Amino acid sequence: MSAVELRCNVRAPGVPLRHVWEHTVGSGHAPLALRADYQTQLKRCHDELGIRHVRFHGLLCDDVGTLVGELDKLVYSFFNAFQIWDALLASGMRPFVELSFMPTILASGSTTVFHYRGNVTPPRDYGAWETLIRKFAAESVDRYGVAEVRTWFFEVWNEPNLRAFWTGTQQDYFTLYRHTAAALKSVDAALRVGGPATADDAWIDEFLDFSEKTGVAADFVSTHHYPTDAFGKPGDDTEAQLAASERSVLRDRARRVYGQARGKPLYYTEWNTSSNPRDPMHDEPYAAAVVVKTMLEATGLVDCYSYWTFSDIFEENYFPSIPFHGGFGLLTLQGVAKPSYRAFEVLHHLGTELVASLTNIHPTVDVWVARDSGAQRLTVVLTNHALPRHPIACEHVRVLLEGAPRPTDAFVQRIDADHANAKAAWLAMGSPTYPSAADVEQLHHASRLICEPQRWRVEEGALLIELDIPPHAVAAVTLTLGAPVSST
């Protein structure tokens, strides 16, 4: 095995490492937030991963009861919506409010999406829609206080450029946006509204042209992307789609959209390693490597990078039962951490300054070096990642840290086939569909992120760290710094 050697000067000026992955996380369907297990998992994501907002579909759907018809009258009820928000706030989270889907009583058609039948048609009366949004915002401000609601984000609709989610035209969406923004700003001018919430980074220029020409507020730009960029379905040949993609494609797309955003905050309110809700790789170390690589490559480009989703408690197609079924979540139905969850845990504990980004030097290995603000802790993060059907092997990596003080402590945390990989343990126990409490405890144990001692030595006046990185893996070496290294 030949060695991959990378070096950097840790005394060089760094760049801010904003934890944009902690801004928001996704979730499937608003009523799920009323479940006790959902609330427990969400609080865990806040407490352990530092995530601050959550976004989901369907807040205005009939099953929430926000607006229904009774005896030919419109009946507004925000009780269930406020129960949901109460639960979020109790867990330390705040809503990133996706205003969707169309209440049936306002809908211009009958086309729906997902098993819960969210209506995806424009309103037959845009004025009535504006009244709904204004009432909703006003009642929210009255209940939670204007200072609190100003910390939220209001995103208009979900992926209107896909026929599956919006039967109207682009112009119809802009009309919906104009009425929504007017309603929110009439309640308080400081409420934040944005869009176009599109799939595949679409409509950014058109949306901002519309905003500038009409004077309609756009406080932020939001969009979505996946490496597959398809409206994923169970049974999709996701592996073939990914094999035909390009390594770092999400970074390249984010860079382009950053240039289009005209200085406005850029929020990616959905992304994942693929758009298939039954992709086996979502449960495997492959996803962890993609998460770390994607998030660190987004440095300086985005303000929010929201993973879709935090939990497999999710029901767009149907509610699953198998613990490792390839769902979008960071956590299984039982709350067992997947490798992707552990990747976010590694990211959460990084410092706030990126000292080095050693990427595109090797076909599969990338390295980043981060330090905390007090320069007392340095973390070297390594990934070994290739797209499916592309060459990848275990690599011996040598990282030379020039100017690094001698560490007083050094440990490594790994995510790979043999570390923090609960799916492997589940397969070994016979893949039970309904694991017992003892089984779940064993899976929790297998999912742990373990700190192992990391050896180091001084070579040519630099601090040398050597380790083997298996395929589709993450390794994070954390150094507590002491006296400076000397070449003598």
Image (spheres, rainbow, N blue to C red):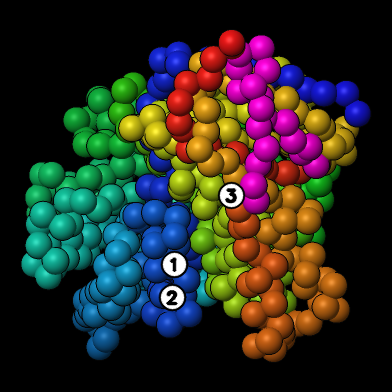
Which residue does the numbered mark 1 point to in the structure image? Answer: 44
Mark 3 or 2: in front is 3
Separation of disc 3 and disc 2 at Cα? 20 Å
Is 341 a magenta residue?
no
Image coordinates for residue 67, horizontal then vertical, percent: 28, 74
**Disc 2 + disc 1, Cβ < 8 Å:** yes
Q: Classify mark 3: residues with Cα within 10 Å, few (<14), some (14-19) or many (20+).
A: many
- Kindly identify which numbered label has been placed on residue 58: none
Instruction: Check the picture and name the quadrant holding the C terminus.
Output: top right
Q: Residue placed at 22% from the left, 45% from the top?
A: 192
Instruction: Tell me if residue 298 comes above or below residue 259 in the rendering.
Output: below
Separation of disc 2 and disc 1 at Cα? 6 Å
- Tell me, yes or no, if residue 276 can be seen here: no
**Disc 3 + disc 2, Cβ < 8 Å:** no
Q: Residue placed at 47% from the left, 21% from the top?
A: 484
Instruction: Tell me if residue 161 comes above or below residue 72 in the rendering.
Output: above
Q: At label 1, which amino acid type do we have?
A: Arg
- Tell me, yes or no, if residue 102 can be seen here: yes
Instruction: Tell me if residue 400 comes above or below residue 99 in the rendering.
Output: above
Which residue does the numbered mark 3 point to in the structure image? Answer: 343
Which residue does the numbered mark 2 point to in the structure image? Answer: 40
Q: Classify mark 1: residues with Cα within 10 Å, few (<14), some (14-19) or many (20+).
A: some
Q: At label 2, which amino acid type do we have?
A: Thr
Q: Classify mark 2: residues with Cα within 10 Å, few (<14), some (14-19) or many (20+).
A: few
Which stretch did the figure color magenta? Answer: 452-470
